[in-house]
Image: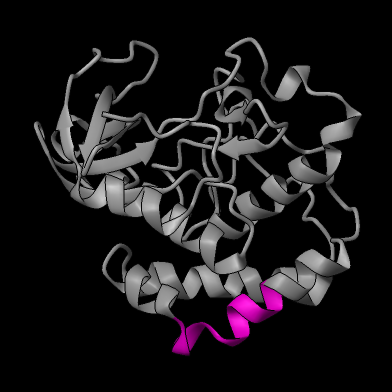
Amino acid sequence: MTVRPQHQPLGTPQALELLRNGKMTEAHGRLPWGSNFTFLMTVSCDGDKALAIYKPRQGERPLWDFPDGSLCQRETAAFVVSEALGWRLVPPTVLRDGPQGRGMVQLFVEHDPDRHYFTLGSEFRAQLGQIALFDHLINNADRKGGHCLLDKQGSIWAIDHGICFHTAPKLRTVIWDFAGDEIPADLLADLGKFVGRFGDSAASLELQQLLTAPEIQALLRRGDALITTKRYPMPGAGRQYPWPPI
């Protein structure tokens, strides 16, 4: 049996096929640092295998401001939006049944756990600016520094999107470096295509299975606001940083 190298480009149809249809075996244990049940698994299909993160719905901790059992859907929705934008910030992610029931399954990214947002230098500014804009769009309530993974090829991957897409402002992030800056023209163009073509897009159909209609409408309103102002928003009132920050 061959092992699919983890450093190959993520987001490919082959990776999604493996995650959707592969057999989930060889549980390598529960990851201890998350508040929800998170397992490292091996997924195998047709002679290929890869490591994946599995977060079952039944292991989600109830939250007062998000519907119970919806976090795995929000994780999957973040991948759908990232792909629709053409940004490929989120590792391939699917919603499927697993050993602990239905949940989110995401391709594991090999990375240095000692490298995170607070240790990344100025050479990563463009990638971090893209992640910051993504978080404004999806209304990420928990962008910790450790949710930015640096792979062996120098690409940063954004993970942990279980508490995103709320209709009310919830943004909490450590990435405020770009507040008030102009949004780069290429990112604005991507936003314009995403919002302008949303009704006829495959992403629209996928998100309807993952989010509520008001949540999708709020997503599009945030996109419109970013396109109109052409600037990264400034911090608003209330708590703007997650805890812990890493």
Tell me what residue is drawn at x 84 percent, y 45 percent: 178
Q: Quadrant of residue 64?
A: top left
* Residue 195 occupies quadrant: bottom right
Is 146 magenta? The answer is no
Q: Is residue 11 visible?
A: yes
Residue 236 position, x and y percent, is 71, 48
The N terminus lies in quadrant:
top left
Relative horizontal placement of residue 65, taking residue 8 as reference (left or right): left
Q: Position of residue 211 (x, y in %)?
A: 33, 64
Please name the colour scheme applied to the rendered image.
one colour
Q: Residue furthest bottom?
A: 200
Residue closer to the observer: 11 or 45: 45
Name the residue: 70% across, 79% down. Answer: 192
The C terminus appears in which quarter of the rendering? top right
Q: Residue furthest front?
A: 1
- Residue 152 against residue 89 in the figure, above or below: above
Residue at the spot 82% in from the left edge and 71% down from the top edge: 229
- 181 shown above or below 191: above
Q: Position of residue 218 (x, y in %)?
A: 50, 70
Classify 36 as above or below 76: above
Judging depth in this view, the residue of 217 and 31 nearest the camera is 31
Observer able to see residue 67: no
In the depicted view, which residue is nearer to us: 199 or 220? 199
Q: Is residue 193 magenta?
A: yes
Instruction: Kindly identify the residue that appears in the image at 73 percent across and 68 percent down.
Output: 226
Region rendered in magenta: 191-201
Q: Is residue 118 left or right of residue 36?
A: right
- Image: 174 above or below 216: above
- Give the x, y percent position of residue 100: 9, 32
The rendered magenta stretch, by its main secondary structure, is classed as helix
Q: Which sits in the foreground, 35 or 235?
A: 35
